[in-house]
Amino acid sequence: MILNRKQIKKEVEKGLVEDYPHLETHLQPNGFDITVGEIHRFKEPGRLDFSNSEREIPETEKIEPERKNKEDDYRWWKLQKGSYKIKTNERFNMPNDLAGIVFPRSSLLRMGCTTETGVWDAGFSGKAEFILMVMNEEVEIKENARVAQLLFVTTEEVEDGYRGVYGE
C-alpha cells in the first residue's frame, strides 16, 4: 500500500522526514516532494563490482548557485546538458516497515530533465543523493526547488533494515 497525504503527514510528525522547508508544500496526495540542497558535478569515473570490494564512488565537486538579483533570497544553478548528483535538504528516517520509491516531478520532465535513484530500503536513515539528468541544452534550478516525489510503500517489517554505506 502507498501512503496517502494524511498518513505521510502523521509519519513526518513522528520523525519520518526532517529538515524540510515547508511541510504543506511537500505533501502531495500520494507522496512527499524532495528538494534540492546541493548539486555536484562528477570529477572522475567510478567502479562497481558484485561484492563492493572494488567499488569506487567517484569524487564530485559542489557547484555553487548564483544570485540573479541582489534582492533574491535564493540562488540559482545554471546546468548544461549532462549528469549531476543531487543532495537533498531533507533527512529521511525510514522505519523497518516502509520502503521508498522516487519519481521525477512532472515539471522537471517538461523541462527535459529527469532523476534516477534506487529503491530506498526500510531502515535507511540520512540525507538522500540521486542523479539529475539534464537532457535539454541548459536548465536553471533554484535552491530548494522540488525536483522529485517520494512514494512511501508499506511492507512487512524487515528484521534487518538498510545496512549500506550511504546512510548517515
Image (cartoon, grey):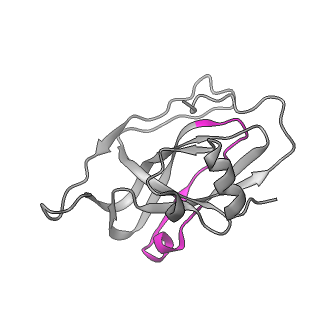
Q: Is residue 40 left or right of residue 109?
A: left
Residue 68: percent from the left, percent from the top?
A: 17, 64
Bounds of the magenta segment: 103-125
* Residue 61 placement: quadrant: top left
Q: Position of residue 108 (x, y in %)?
A: 47, 69
Name the residue rendered at 52%, 57% in the picture.
23
Residue 114 magenta-highlighted: yes
Image quadrant in which you'd find residue 7: bottom right
Position of the C terminus, as image quadrant, is top right
Most extreme residue toward the bottom is 110
Quadrant of res 42: top left
Q: Residue furthest right?
A: 156
Q: Position of residue 18 (x, y in %)?
A: 53, 43
Please, which residue is most extreme toward the left here? 70
x then y, percent, for residue 49: 63, 32
With respect to residue 153, does 43 lie above or below? above
* Front-lying residue, 157 or 80: 157
Quadrant where the N terminus sits is bottom right
Name the residue rendered at 77%, 37% in the picture: 96
Query: Is 151 in the magenta?
Result: no
- Residue 101 visible at all: no
Instruction: Answer yes or no: is residue 161 visible.
Output: yes
